Amino acid sequence: MTGRVPAEISTIAEPCVLLKVGEIVLKGGNRHYFERLLLANLRRALRDLGPEVRLWNRNGVILIRLADGHLTGPAAESAMDKVAERVRDVMGIARVCRVVRVPQDAELAVTTAVALAAGRTGSFAVRARRRDKRFPVSSAELAVRIGRQVQQAYGYPVDLKHPDFTLFVEVDHHEVFVYTDGSAGQGGLPVGMSGRALVLMSGGIDSPVAAYRMMRRGLRCDFLHFSGMPLTGPESVYKAYGLMYQLDRFQCDSRLWVVAFGKTQQKLASSGASRLQIVAQRRLMLKTGEALARRLGGSALVTGDSLGQVSSQTLTNLTALDDAVSLPILRPLIGLDKIEIMAEARRIRTLALSELPDQDCCTLLTPRQVETQARIADLRKLEARLDAGDLAEELAGIAQEYRPDHSSTLPS
């Protein structure tokens, strides 16, 4: 981990985390609201980490420090490493930097930068920035002084275009931050900025990735899973819960709602759904999702549909699904292929869980041939026989809620 306090300046230096925000800096007059929301999300993400921390917002840069009197030395370093790891998953953060904070003094800034360069290999560059224009040394002069002393101390070659590592020095109004490199954050927008939506979580590969993408655009997501119970075991519920738990690190305070859908699927099959079975049950899932979303204050539904990926996801069938509800259906994966979706699932660490075997309710009572060109009129006639609107309200009413804090007991 970069940004550790060198021993020679440990008495006057402090380990911190510096965050660079993403696109919210472009939000004009609403920017302050978005920054307050981002700070609230950061506090929520850090609330159970252990040591108390303080956050400061400084015009596009957020500083995280340990509270006064809390931890010193290696314990402080370890605590700030954990903070940096946790905030990498907070939406709206473009870059996470473990920094050394020292008093605003040019010689001290140079000494700290030289110490941080110890033990590195290859070429280097220095990037200095002076936010406080009253600081007596210009950014260019500070970079030259640091570069010269690093070369004298270690003999590293300078490469300003493609360095193997970079020393960053940022002069703020009361202190100087020194660090090497940094790591990418999630980017995007703070969760909650774009409202609330309900994700239809199948337990497969696609829907968790769809949820992640919408969180990254500022949507707070609740999750709805349809299990095949009582015709199947609870395995799919465990998967959905695990996926919700994994995705919770991107937004905190997630909620999973589970509907036992097996008997309803039997009703659809006995009503003569035949080739329309898959599309009809997906329409009923969407209707149930809409009923639940309205109770939760959600203004959209999210699915993992990808155009043409399976027979139920033809353009005609997707149009028939849109007809089932009045809420908008967001499909962030619509133009991606399976390889692209799997790559993103691997990156956000949901792929291994999604690939675990279970009996998905969508595979129950599947007809030999699935309708690829479903007619909306035929689907509406089928739903009229079942009173689909009332049935959806009933299913939404019996949905069981689970949270990632283990306050609820999973079915056995």
Image (cartoon, helix red, strand yellow):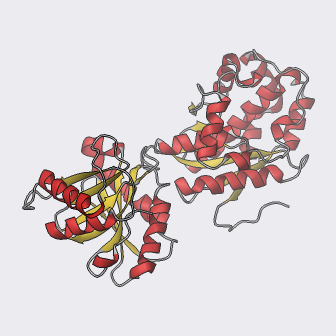
In terms of depth relative to the viewer, which is nearer, 185 or 153? 153
Relative placement, left or right, of 48 versus 260 is left
Which quarter of the rendered picture does the N terminus lie within? Answer: bottom left
Q: Quadrant of residue 76?
A: bottom left
Q: Residue sitting at 76 percent across and 48 percent down?
A: 259
- Looking at the picture, tell me which residue is in the foreground, 261 or 49: 49
Q: Quadrant of the C terminus?
A: bottom right
The answer to whether 310 is drawn above or below residue 26 in the figure is: above
From the viewer's perspective, is residue 164 above or below residue 175? above
Does any portion of residue 284 appear in the rendered image?
yes
Q: In the image, residue 290 lies at what x, y percent?
A: 63, 39
Check the image and report above or below for 334 versus 256.
Answer: above
Image label count: 0
**Where does the image place residue 81, in percent across and percent down from the top left?**
46, 67
Q: Is residue 27 visible?
A: no
Q: Is 218 positioned to the left or the right of 258 in the image? A: left
**Residue 347 appears left or right of 384:** left
Direction bottom: furthest residue: 69
Which residue lies at the image location 46% right of the left edge and 59% below the top edge? 87
Residue 160 sits in which quadrant?
top left
108 is higher (above) or lower (below) than 20:
below
Location of residue 134 (image quadrant) = bottom left
User: Residue at point 68% right, 16% down?
Assistant: 316
Q: Position of residue 272 (x, y in %)?
A: 90, 24
Identified at 63% across, 55% down, the residue is: 246
